[in-house]
Amino acid sequence: MIQPLLSNPLLLVALACGLDRLVGDPRWCPHPVVVMGWWITLLRRGAEAWAGTRAWKLLLAGGLITLVLVGGSGLAGWVVEQLTPTPLLVVALASALAGRSLEQAVLQVLEALPNSLQAVKNQTDDAGGKPSLVALQPARQALAWIVGRDTADLDAPEILRAAAETASENAVDGLFAPLFWMLVGAGIWSLNPALPGPLALAWGFKAASTLDSMLGYRRGRLRWLGTAGARLDDLLVWLPCRLVALGLPLAAGQPGRCFSMLAAALRDGAADPSPNAGVSQAAYAHAAGVQLGGSNRYGGQLTSKPLLAQGLPAPDGAAVRHMLELSRRLELVWLATAAVLAFITKTLS
């Protein structure tokens, strides 16, 4: 059972991080986020049938959905912590992390792009020698799996920018935010193993994140129904996002720039409608030395995002890979820092 490792819950988190990097998300195994998605769909149908188009009812229903899903996910995590053998608990913890899956998805875009670029050189249409519209299709299709923007007409530089932006934003949402709450839970568990621990907090966060991704849109009924989940996700990501911006210079081997880079990320990201997305992208932009941001299309509608690290070069494939490497290094920095803090706390107690 889990008892032998309860005295060192941080080891469980470290093992989960290693398993995530080694295996990722096996497609044959039902993922907890998929289960959360099923419940959100079911609860949304009931909420919309009850509330109709009345804003106050949709707001109330959205709050209840958030309470049920986040509370239920946290409770499920706590039960698993108390009843599950250690190996399965490590697997459950790893399911809350998306380090490898994000990296693989971004690398698939980059790996498709060189072949597409060669196709651009070799293929032209019959009207004036312009590049064929299908030449970049493999990279566009790979990108469409991981971004919300329209990808059908993106050229190579825009594909690279989109890959860089999703590598930076989703590193916070998919890796560092759940890892932060996992570490908080490990700290709570070290004080009292009967309390909700790393899995309870991580699954609770993933529920809020899934709510935001499925309902957090400012259109139609979702403008009200998704408000509670979106605001809770913003709140839970706020601190991890800023810790990422503070720690990236350490991962980049520039410890003297920690506070100046944090200030730059906060300044550049302030114009973004999201309190976290712009900051996370700006932090990676400054750390990798590239400019991000600009105009994107979502559902055919043009949206202008603020320029981040303005004046630096546009991202190329090497810069995107560097961002992925920075995430791997920063994950180790976080685990090492948590181990040091745990040691100091144990020594002083």
Image (cartoon, rainbow, N blue to C red):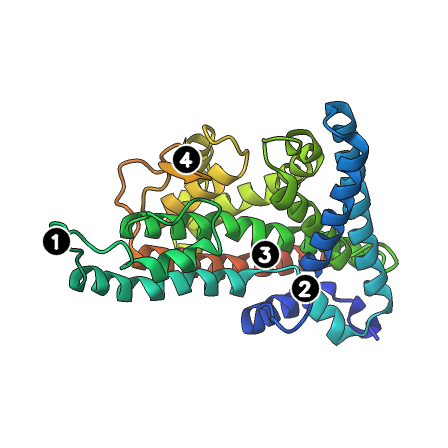
Amino acid on which the number 2 mark rests in the picture:
His
Q: Quadrant of residue 133?
A: bottom left
Q: Which residue is mark 2?
A: 31
Q: Quadrant of residue 326?
A: bottom left
**Badge 4 density bin: few <14, some 14–19, many ≥20, Cα 10 Å:** some
Q: Which residue is mark 1?
A: 129
Looking at marks 4 and 2 on the same chain, the residue that comes earlier in the sequence is marked by 2
Residue 105 spot, x, y in % from top left: 46, 62
**Kind of element beneath mark 4:** helix
Would residue 263 be found to the left or right of residue 332 on screen?
left
Q: Which residue is mark 3?
A: 337
User: What is the distance, in whole Å, between disc 3 and disc 2 at their CAs?
Assistant: 29 Å
Q: Nearer the viewer, mark 4 or mark 2?
A: 2
Q: Quadrant of residue 221?
A: top right
Amino acid on which the number 4 mark rests in the picture:
Ala
User: What is the distance, in whole Å, between disc 1 and disc 3 at their CAs?
Assistant: 56 Å
Amino acid on which the number 3 mark rests in the picture:
Thr
**Badge 2 density bin: few <14, some 14–19, many ≥20, Cα 10 Å:** some
Q: Nearer the viewer, mark 3 or mark 2?
A: 2
Q: Quadrant of the C terminus?
A: bottom right
Q: Furthest-left residue in view?
A: 128
Q: Label 3 near label 4: C-beta < 8 Å? A: no
User: What is the distance, in whole Å, between disc 1 and disc 4 at their CAs?
Assistant: 43 Å
Looking at marks 1 and 2 on the same chain, the residue that comes earlier in the sequence is marked by 2
**Kind of element beneath mark 1:** loop
